[in-house]
Image: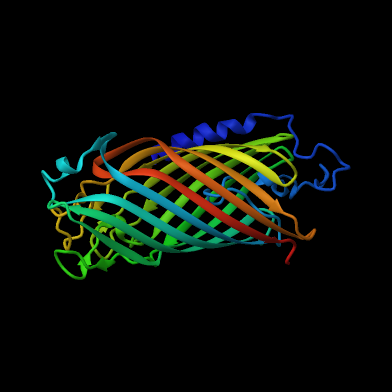
C-alpha cells in the first residue's frame, strides 16, 4: 500500500497544472460543445480516451452506454534472472526443463454505463489462450496449452473533478475468481499434467482494485496519468496467493485531426512474490512451477492511436491500437523475458439511453 500512496500523491499533484487550457477552442466548431455545456467535450475528441490498454481511463455522462472489444497479444522469449539474461544451459543446472517461448491471446468484452454524471460502472470478461514452448535437458521441444474464461472484473468510476480543461476520478472495483487454476495438458513426462502458475487463467481469489485517474486537455494535445493497485484477498483452493500488483501509467496524445490522435505512454508495474505454493507441482521440473521464481518490476514504453470512425451524431465508433515494448525488467529468481505486447480495440457508444 505504500507504493500506491506514493504514486497517487505524485500523480494527483499534477491536477493544479495547465489552469488556462480549454477543451473547446471555437464555439463555431460543430465537433465541439460549448464551454457552458462541456460534459462530453473532452471525451468526444479522439484523444478524449487514453491508450487502449488502460482500464477505466475515462467516464461517461448520465445515460451513456459503451460496448467494447479488445484483443491483446503478449509475447515472451528467453529467460531472465534479475535484469540479466540467463542461458538454457544454466537453467538445466537446477531444472529438468527450460521455458523457451510463450504467447498469450486475450479477447476482452466490456460494458460501461453511467447511471449518473458522477458515476460510471464497468464490467469486463475475457477469454484467454496461452501457449508455451519448452526445452527438455535432452534438447527436445514440446508445447503446452491452456485456454478458457478468465476472472471477471467489476469497477466503479467516481468523479472528483470535471472542468473544460481537466478531469479526475477514483477507480474502485473487484475481480471475481471465474478463471481456472487447474489447467492441465499432456507432456513427455506425464499425461494430464498440472501446468505452472503462469499458464493458469485466473487468480483463484477475490481481488480488490483501487486507484485514480487524471486527464488534462489542451487545444491539440492531452495527457493523463493513472495508478491502480490490485490486492489479493486470502489464499485460493490450491493454497497459494498471487502477488499484489501496483502500476502507474502516464501518457500523452496529439490530436492530428478531429478523428485521429497519436499517443505515447510509459507504464511501470511491480508484481509482488507469490505466497504459498501448489503442492501438486514439482518445483524441480521447470523454473515457472517453482513459486520462488515470482514477482517482478517492469517499465514499458507504448505507442498507439485512436480513430473515430464517422457515424451518426448520436453513436460513435472508435478504433484503437497500442504496442508496448519493455524498457526495463527485473525479476525475482528465474522468469521469462517479456518481448512486446499489442492491443487492438473497438468501442461503440450510445448517448442518452435513459
In the image, residue 171 above or below residue 2: below
- Residue 226 position, x and y percent, is 53, 42
- Taking the spot 64% from the left edge, 29% from the top edge, the residue there is 17
Q: Nearer the viewer, residue 254 or 226?
A: 254
**Residue at the spot 53% in from the left edge and 34% down from the top edge:** 11
Residue at 52% from the left image edge and 49% from the top image edge: 53
Image quadrant occupied by the C terminus: bottom right
In the foreground, 109 or 247: 109
- Residue 185 in the image: x percent, y percent? 25, 67
172 over 206 or under it: above or below: above
Q: Residue furthest right?
A: 28
Residue 258 placement: quadrant: top right
Check the image and name the residue furthest to the bottom: 192
Q: Nearer the viewer, residue 192 or 266?
A: 192
92 relative position to 166: left or right = left
Q: Quadrant of residue 246?
A: top left
Q: Is residue 100 left or right of residue 69?
A: left
Identify the image's colour scheme: rainbow, by chain, secondary structure or one colour: rainbow
Which x, y percent locates residue 172? 51, 53
The quarter of the picture where the N terminus appears is top left
Kindly identify the residue that appears in the image at 56 percent across and 56 percent down.
156
- Residue 211 in percent (x, y) is at 50, 46
Amino acid at each position: 500500500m505504500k507504493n500506491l500512496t506514493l504514486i497517487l500523491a505524485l500523480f494527483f499533484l499534477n491536477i493544479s497544472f495547465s489552469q488556462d487550457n480549454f477543451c473547446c477552442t471555437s464555439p463555431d466548431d460543430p465537433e465541439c460543445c460549448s464551454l457552458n455545456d462541456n460534459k462530453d467535450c473532452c471525451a468526444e475528441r479522439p484523444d478524449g480516451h487514453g491508450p487502449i490498454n488502460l482500464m477505466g481511463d475515462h467516464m461517461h455522462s448520465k445515460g451513456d452506454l459503451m460496448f467494447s472489444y479488445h484483443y491483446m497479444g503478449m509475447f515472451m522469449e528467453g529467460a531472465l534472472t534479475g535484469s540479466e539474461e540467463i542461458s538454457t544451459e544454466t537453467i538445466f543446472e537446477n531444472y529438468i526443463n527450460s521455458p523457451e517461448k510463450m504467447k498469450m491471446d486475450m479477447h476482452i468484452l466490456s460494458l460501461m454505463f453511467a447511471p449518473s454524471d458522477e458515476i460510471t460502472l464497468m464490467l469486463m470478461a475475457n477469454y484467454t489462450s496461452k501457449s508455451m514452448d519448452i526445452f527438455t535437458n535432452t534438447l527436445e521441444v514440446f508445447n503446452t496449452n491452456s485456454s478458457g474464461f478468465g476472472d471477471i472484473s467489476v469497477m466503479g468510476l467516481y468523479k472528483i473533478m470535471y472542468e473544460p480543461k481537466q478531469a479526475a476520478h477514483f477507480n474502485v472495483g473487484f475481480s471475481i475468481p471465474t478463471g481456472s487454476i487447474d489447467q492441465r495438458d499432456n507432456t513427455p513426462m506425464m499425461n494430464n499434467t498440472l501446468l505452472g502458475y503462469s499458464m493458469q487463467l485466473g487468480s483463484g481469489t477475490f481481488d480488490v482494485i483501487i486507484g485514480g485517474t487524471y486527464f488534462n486537455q489542451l487545444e491539440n494535445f492531452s495527457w493523463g496519468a493513472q495508478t491502480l493497485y490490485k490486492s489479493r484477498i486470502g489464499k485460493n483452493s490450491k493454497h497459494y496467493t498471487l502477488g499484489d500488483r501496483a502500476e502507474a501509467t502516464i501518457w500523452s496524445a496529439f490530436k492530428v485531426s478531429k478523428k485521429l490522435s497519436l499517443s505515447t505512454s510509459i507504464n511501470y508495474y511491480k508484481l509482488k512474490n507469490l505466497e504459498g505454493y501448489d503442492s501438486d507441482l514439482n518445483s524441480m521440473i521447470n523454473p515457472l512451477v517453482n513459486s520462488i521464481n515470482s514477482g517482478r518490476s517492469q517499465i514499458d514504453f507504448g505507442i498507439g492511436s485512436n480513430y473515430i470512425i464517422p457515424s451518426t451524431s448520436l453513436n460513435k465508433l472508435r478504433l484503437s491500437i497500442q504496442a508496448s515494448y519493455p524498457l526495463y525488467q527485473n525479476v525475482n529468481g528465474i522468469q521469462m523475458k517479456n518481448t512486446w505486447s499489442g492491443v487492438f480495440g473497438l468501442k461503440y457508444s450510445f448517448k442518452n439511453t435513459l
